[in-house]
Amino acid sequence: MRYLAEAVPGTHPLTPICGYGSLDLLVIKFYYCAITLDTLVSSALAIAVTLGIAFFIASRLRPGVPSKLQMVLEFLVTYVRGMVSESVAKESTFIIPIAATVGLYILVANWLDFFPLGFSPLLKPANADLNQTLAMAIVVFVIVQWYAFRVRGVGGYFRHYLRPPFPPLTIVEEIVKPVTLSLRLFGNIFAGLLMVYLLTLVPQAYAWTAPISAVGVIIWKFFDVFFVGTIQAFIFMLLTIIYFGQAREGLDEEAHGAHAPTPGHAERAATQASTS
């Protein structure tokens, strides 16, 4: 059973680099001179597997009649392109690789949890650590802010946050986005990990339940990893695209209003056309 369950959920020992210097932010304590080695190793494994899958798929792409793998890939890319086109803009194609890469990486990191990782204390579900999910959410947040600054300009960027009815609430809403994005993914993966841990504790109280507990862990992992893990990867990718769309919210209406003719101009144009 020890190979079916990872260590106690939520335990990520710190490895100091230059001491245990920290910054107390009241709601969280930020250690700026230490790392969680298990999360780095687990995320590195997920990155390696993601790159391996990506290069394998790229090597199998052929012109002409596509293979089943290529058809699945083209369907997914087309779906992401459609969401970007509808939620953001047709010309914002740079969002497609960002959203697709984030979705694929989270999917791989979540699916790796199906395998027994308990044989090594350095291998844990990468997204069960808030450090990991918050880092991804901050990267998305920074890119979205850059995009908003680029499409709106300096004045439009700051006017967007000072819009009515209550500007401070708008600013708070924007800052909270990476927090909610990271907590949603972390909470779901951590809850699944906690459930596995609880199932492996049952045989300690009732030894005869060991086979039942093992089967229960496998069944739960099938559900949690392949269903919940997939849903969470999709939600993170979808919210990433939606945040890009919100970065240019109202921009098209402003541009349309700026180029629309005034009523007086329209009336004069109609009068001139009728008299000529």
Image (cartoon, rainbow, N blue to C red):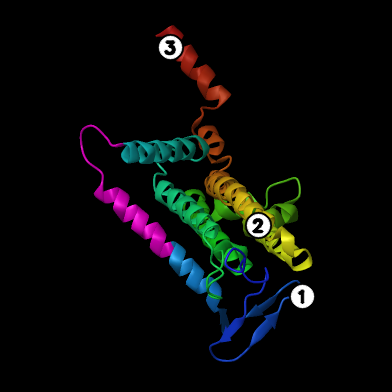
Q: Give the percent coordinates (x, y) of residue 126.
A: 55, 65
Would you name the residue on which mark 2 appears?
A: 211
- The residue at the far bottom in this view is 19
| Spatial separation of the CA atoms under disc 2 and disc 3 | 88 Å
**Image point 70% across, 52% down: which residue?**
170
Which sits earlier in the primary sequence, circle 1 or circle 2?
Answer: 1
Considering the numbered disc 2 on the image, is that residue within a helix, a strand or a loop?
helix
Residue 55 lies in the magenta-colored region: yes
The answer to whether residue 96 is above or below residue 28 is above
- The residue at the far right in this view is 205
In which quadrant of the rendered image does the N terminus lie?
bottom right
Considering the numbered disc 1 on the image, is that residue within a helix, a strand or a loop?
loop
Q: Residues within 10 Å of mark 1 (few under 14, many from 20)?
A: few
Considering the numbered disc 3 on the image, is that residue within a helix, a strand or a loop?
helix
Q: Residues within 10 Å of mark 2 (few under 14, many from 20)?
A: few
| Total numbered badges shown on the rendered structure | 3
The answer to whether residue 37 is above or below residue 176 is below
Would you name the residue on which mark 3 appears?
A: 273
Would you name the residue on which mark 1 appears?
A: 26
Q: Is residue 24 left or right of residue 144?
A: right
Looking at the rendering, the stretch of residues picked out in magenta corresponds to: 47-67
Q: Nearer the viewer, mark 2 or mark 3?
A: 2
